[in-house]
Amino acid sequence: EPEVTQTPSHQVTQMGQEVILRCVPISNHLYFYWYRQILGQKVEFLVSFYNNEISEKSEIFDDQFSVERPDGSNFTLKIRSTKLEDSAMYFCASSEYGTSYNEQFFGPGTRLTVL
Amino acid sequence: SQQGEEDPQALSIQEGENATMNCSYKTSINNLQWYRQNSGRGLVHLILIRSNEREKHSGRLRVTLDTSKKSSSLLITASRAADTASYFCATGSNDYKLSFGAGTTVTVRA
């Protein structure tokens, strides 16, 4: 069964460093998302991406964050200068259609630890 | 905010018993989805119910939706140890994001 994959599973970085989290969405899906979950808290929406542009973003998704689909399969989240509070589990998700119509399928997550 | 809020926060049941958890939300939605998360792992999609549906079944799962009360319930019948996990409801509307609740932690005792 097709699934969303994410790499790495765990990333440790120093405060101020740039990190890139990678995702391979399900191949026939057109909508892509990033969410994060700080330990013990709710899953929070960061950004959605469709047709090579951001379709929606949350207040969390400030200028330190960017997303890109560099080729036909990968979808990346870049954090330019990490902060301690960026430590969280980051989930990529994809869906065939927009949220109103279809399920979002999540990857296993990347645990980001900022020291 | 459309965020779902689950109730109870935690639930402990004996294997074979049923587990019921509830989700309430604040504004109109197009759909409501339930996810399971095993400790420290990813989110597994369980079931989606659309705003014009009242009940949906999938295996041992039964989901209801009452849009007049802005609430949903998830019933897991004949629970197993493998059902031990956190369960989240998430609402979808005319925008792209899902809004998640805080989750219900279910422990199934052998």
Image (cartoon, grey):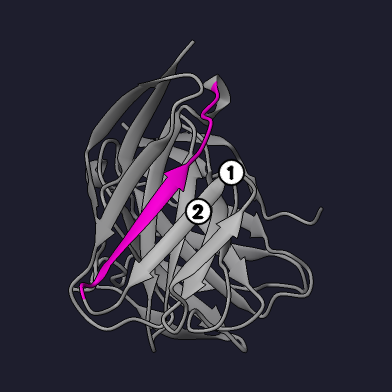
Magenta residue span: B69-80
Q: Secondary structure at mark 1?
A: loop
Give the residue displayed 30% in from the left and 36% down from the top.
A39
Mark 1, chain letter? B
Along the viewing direction, whichever of B109 and B30 lies nearer the viewer? B109
Circle 1 residue: B60
Query: Going by the image, does B68 lie left or right of A87?
Result: left
Q: Residues within 10 Å of mark 1 (few under 14, many from 20)?
A: few
- Tell me which amino acid carries mark 2: Arg
Mark 2, chain letter? B
Q: In this orientation, does residue B98 appear? A: no
Query: Going by the image, does B44 lie left or right of B55?
Result: right
Q: Which mark is residue B105?
A: none
Q: CA distance from mark 1 to mark 2?
A: 7 Å
Find residue A47 and report its horizontal and vertical position in percent.
41, 72
Q: Is residue A25 above or below residue A48?
A: above
Question: Residue lying farthest top?
Answer: B110
Residues at discs 1 and 2 both on one chain: yes
Quadrant of res B31: bottom left
Find residue B73 and report its horizontal and vertical position in percent.
35, 55
Along the viewing direction, whichever of A19 and A38 lies nearer the viewer? A38
Give the residue displayed 20% in from the left and 72% down from the top.
B69
Find residue B16 and report its horizontal and vertical position in percent.
51, 23
Circle 2 residue: B62
Query: Going by the image, does A32 lie left or right of B90?
Result: right
Q: Secondary structure at mark 2?
A: strand
Query: Going by the image, does B5 lie left or right of B12?
Result: left
Find residue B68 and report its horizontal and vertical position in percent.
23, 79
Give the residue displayed 40% in from the left and 74% down from the top.
B97
Residue A113 part of the magenta-drawn span? no
- Tell me which amino acid carries mark 1: Arg
Q: Residues within 10 Å of mark 2 (few under 14, many from 20)?
A: some
